[in-house]
Image (tube, grey):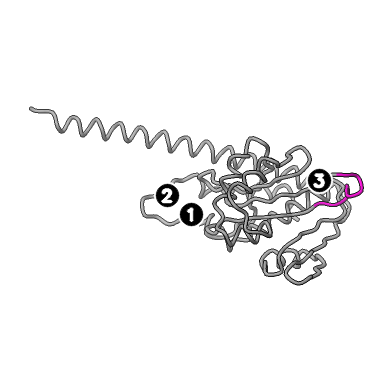
Amino acid sequence: MLDATNLIKASLEAGLEFWRPPHEGESAPAAERSTPLLVPIRSLGANHRERIETHLLSLDPGDRYLRFGYAAQDHQIRRYVEALDFERDEIFGIYNRKLELIAMAHLAYGEDDSHGSCAEFGVSVLPSARGKGYGARLFDRAAMHATNDGISMMFIHALSENAAMLKIARNAGARIERDGTESEAYLTLPESTFDSRVTELIEEQVALTDYRLKAQAKQFWSFLADVQAVRRDAIDAQSRMPY
């Protein structure tokens, strides 16, 4: 587990490339091509509902099938997003430098006291962001939060063909039970510690700072683009003026 100093250092190193806009024809920044030591993951509130919907609607039919266990149609995804309970559950997200939600996880808590110590984990990652370990990082983040929230068991209901999701659960030490086309993964969580609580607070603060910087950078580059467009229009108008 990273300590506070390493968390902040890792965040700065991971985020440096995000603040520079790519030149025309340039490939994605190094920070988006490989997994940084720390991926800024923030808790999402109701004000992120629209971006969550955009993210899930961007999934192709195959990815929707793996994420929800059925071929979810657009109207079903919209109903799912509308029903998200941000007071009861926890939703985590990873944003790129364009403030696009490229990966998200839903940690759903039991709705009654008999299942109060359990939570279910679900995750989705856009195709362009795969291969970077974001699913595993979201799982770790959700497990840390569940631990600090007094949850003793986290489980995943997944299709048996969802090898990526089952691999994440297996690597975390979860027990996996297969039943034909479906599988259940159970992860017993340890009790929270002072270190786990402080680490979560630092990670959330780092993620909030990362998001604010990305938002500021996006606004700044948009402003510059508008200024450049005005300048081009002025130059074009001047070039058309008769002498």
In the figure, residue 228 lies in which quadrant?
Answer: top left
In the figure, residue 241 lies in which quadrant?
Answer: top left
Circle 1 SS class: loop
Residue at mark 2: 22
Q: Start and end of the magenta stretch?
A: 112-119
Looking at the image, the residue that sits furthest to the left is: 243
Residue at mark 3: 197
Location of the N terminus by quadrant is: bottom right
Between 230 and 6, the residue placed more toward the observer is 230
Q: Identity of the amino acid at label 2?
A: Pro
Q: x%, y% of residue 170?
A: 76, 67
Q: Residue at x 78, y 51 (%)?
A: 144
- How much space separates mark 2 and mark 3, taking CA atoms? 37 Å
> Label 3: how many residues lie within 10 Å, few (<14), some (14-19) or many (20+)?
some
Q: x%, y% of residue 138?
A: 69, 54
Q: x%, y% of residue 98?
A: 50, 45
Asked whether, in this view, residue 24 is left or right of residue 103, the answer is: left
